[in-house]
Amino acid sequence: MAFIGLLDDRFNLRARYKAMAGLAVSILLTAHILRSMGQSLGHVTFLGFSLAANTALVAPLVMLWFWAIPQAYNLIDGINGLSMGFAALLLGVLSLSLGIQSPLAWGGLVAVLLLNFPKAHHFLGDCGALMLGTLFAILGLQAFGGRDPNMLLWVFAYPIIDVTLVVSIRKWKGQGLGVADRSHLHHWMMEHVHGRAWVATPILLGLGVLPMLQSTHFPSHRLLSAAGLVALLALALKVFWDRAIKHTRRKPQAVVRREIPFMLPDALRESGSHLKL
């Protein structure tokens, strides 16, 4: 996935090619996960439904997870510190809830953050974002897939809601899914804080970390996670209203038509300027 992102950063690949490459990688990862985790994925409850020990039922869900999460994580990499801050939050949740330690990942995040302080000079690009998204998709499934897959939706609530919002807006406006626009949560937030990323990033990370508390034993974690999820959904609905509904309801400006006389002055006609009209 890092190599795919590197090619995209260098040659600006079309969205369909990146999607096809991501799908191929997700198929390989799904085959590996189903082999390594055995039947544990088939004896859990997801969204109120008990997953039978049936590969034909579990495999499409796992493949969708490995295909969608790296792309969603890549899409939130839009303002300084957002994707790397979210990566730090994910590492913290995995460490607190399951004791998973990732010193190399922590070291990489801290190094890039220090290099980018106080002004950003180094960026993840698609290479870094797709790689981190794939890494966290793997760690998340290994952490929660065998015991409570519902936690995946809580922990990754921010990128899931953001990509759902973008897809909904583009479908509403009749745009292609691969067409870039400014429909993300961070675009809307940046516009409302006058382009100050140091204000927008902490706000968005604060909203993103609250649903993650569902997987921890933090005091009042259920209430806080539910409040964070409601706040994220409310923000997404507001952005959808501003970017989609208000956009389509906006009346086009009246076109002022001016009639040009059939007979033009001789000086204008002789100069040939009437051809430019």
Image: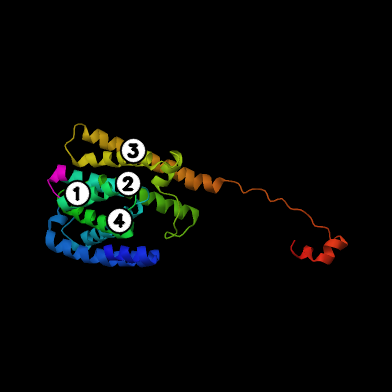
Q: Earlier in the sequence, mark 4 or mark 3?
A: 4
In this rendering, the label closer to the viewer, 1 or 3 = 1
What residue type is disc 4 on?
Ala
In this rendering, the label closer to the viewer, 4 or 3 = 4
Residue sitting at x 35%, y 37% = 231
Residue to which mark 1 is pinned: 106
Residue to which mark 4 is pinned: 129
Q: Earlier in the sequence, mark 2 or mark 1?
A: 2
Residue sitting at x 40%, y 66% = 14
In this orientation, which residue lies closer to the viewer: 150 or 177?
177
**Which secondary structure, mark 2?**
helix
In this orientation, which residue lies closer to the viewer: 71 or 80?
80
Disc number placed over residue 82 in the picture, else none: 2
In this rendering, the label closer to the viewer, 1 or 4 = 1
Queried whether the magenta region covers residue 100, the answer comes back as: yes
- Evaluate if marks 4 and 3 touch, with contact meaning CB atoms under 8 Å apart: no
Count of marks, rendered view:
4
**Which secondary structure, mark 3?**
helix
Cα separation, mark 2 vs mark 1, equals 16 Å
Quarter of the picture holding the N terminus: bottom left
**In the rendered structure, which segment of residues is drawn in magenta?**
95-101
Q: Earlier in the sequence, mark 1 or mark 4?
A: 1
Q: Earlier in the sequence, mark 2 or mark 4?
A: 2
Q: Earlier in the sequence, mark 1 or mark 3?
A: 1
Residue to which mark 3 is pinned: 230
Residue 167's spot in the image, x, y percent? Answer: 40, 54
Cα separation, mark 1 vs mark 4, equals 15 Å
What residue type is disc 1 on?
Trp
